């Protein structure tokens, strides 16, 4: 957890320097995390629990990839995907191989074992994989694109995902503008 906390401290320092610390929500309570776990039907990873305890997501648009989902928003996002999966919408994609033959991710277009992590508002976002394939690791982070399907893992751990976010923030790739976090080159072009 020390690594995760150190990464969060870097992210918080960037938000504070931007005068945007309020975009990071306060930490989730154990009751909120327990409600998410009850909905999911399994416990979340220790890293995800620690991250949620630190910040229960961001305000809408307050994260480089759109919105970092808190416990309630993660459940809402998972509900949509689960309804599509259970309704048969992905039946034609049951052989989709997100890890391109590496057996790190279970085949298919969606899994009840995925916890939505962030969302761009257009049906895309990262997920934490709690039911990896035989060569994968629990807690790996996948990318879910509503048109292309899942791919990855992009990161072996949630800490790896957060590390990449911290590096992008610190390098100046993102800025705070109009109450949200945007790619610096998009803001400069306007």
Image: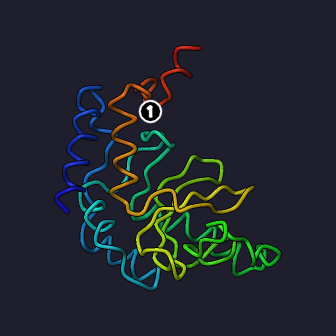
135 w.r.t. 182: above or below: below
- Neighbourhood count class around disc 1 (C-alpha, 10 Å): few under 14, some 14–19, many 20 upward: many
Q: Nearer the viewer, residue 138 or 118?
A: 138
Residue at 56% from the left image edge and 79% from the top image edge: 112
Instruction: Single out the residue that lies furthest toward the left.
Output: 2
Left or right: 120 as drawn, with respect to 173: right
Secondary element type, mark 1: strand
Left or right: 129 as drawn, with respect to 160: right
Instruction: Single out the residue that lies furthest toward the right.
Output: 92
Q: Give the quarter of the image for residue 95.
A: bottom right
Q: How many marks?
A: 1
Q: Nearer the viewer, residue 102 or 48?
A: 102
Residue at 60% from the left image edge and 78% from the top image edge: 106
65 w.r.t. 150: above or below: above
Residue 58, x across and y down, in percent: 38, 47
Residue 15, x across and y down, in percent: 29, 34
Q: Give the quarter of the image for residue 146.
A: bottom right
175 w.r.t. 62: above or below: above
- Label 1 sits on residue: 181
Residue 76, x across and y down, in percent: 53, 65
Q: Quadrant of the N terminus?
A: bottom left
Residue 164, x across and y down, in percent: 39, 45
Instruction: Single out the residue that lies furthest toward the front.
Output: 102
Residue at 42% from the left image edge and 63% from the top image edge: 156
Q: Quadrant of the C terminus?
A: top right
Colour logic: rainbow
């Amino acid at each position: 957890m020390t690594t995760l906390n150190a990464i969060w401290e870097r992210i918080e320092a960037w938000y504070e320097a931007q005068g945007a610390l309020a975009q990071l929500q306060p930490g989730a309570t154990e009751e909120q995390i327990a409600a998410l776990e009850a909905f999911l039907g399994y416990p979340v990873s220790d890293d995800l629990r620690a991250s949620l305890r630190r910040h229960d997501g961001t305000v809408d648009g307050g994260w480089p990839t759109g919105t970092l989902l808190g416990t309630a928003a993660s459940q809402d996002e998972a509900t949509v995907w689960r309804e599509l999966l259970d309704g048969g919408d992905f039946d034609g994609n049951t052989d989709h191989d997100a890890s391109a033959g590496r057996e790190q991710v279970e085949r298919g277009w969606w899994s009840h074992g995925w916890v939505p992590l962030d969302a761009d508002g257009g049906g895309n976002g990262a997920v934490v994989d709690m039911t990896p394939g035989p060569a994968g690791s629990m807690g790996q982070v996948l990318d879910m694109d509503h048109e292309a399907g899942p791919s990855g893992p992009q990161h072996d751990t949630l800490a790896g995902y957060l590390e990449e976010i911290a590096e992008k923030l610190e390098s100046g790739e993102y800025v705070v503008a109009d109450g949200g976090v945007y790619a610096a080159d998009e803001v400069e072009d306007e």
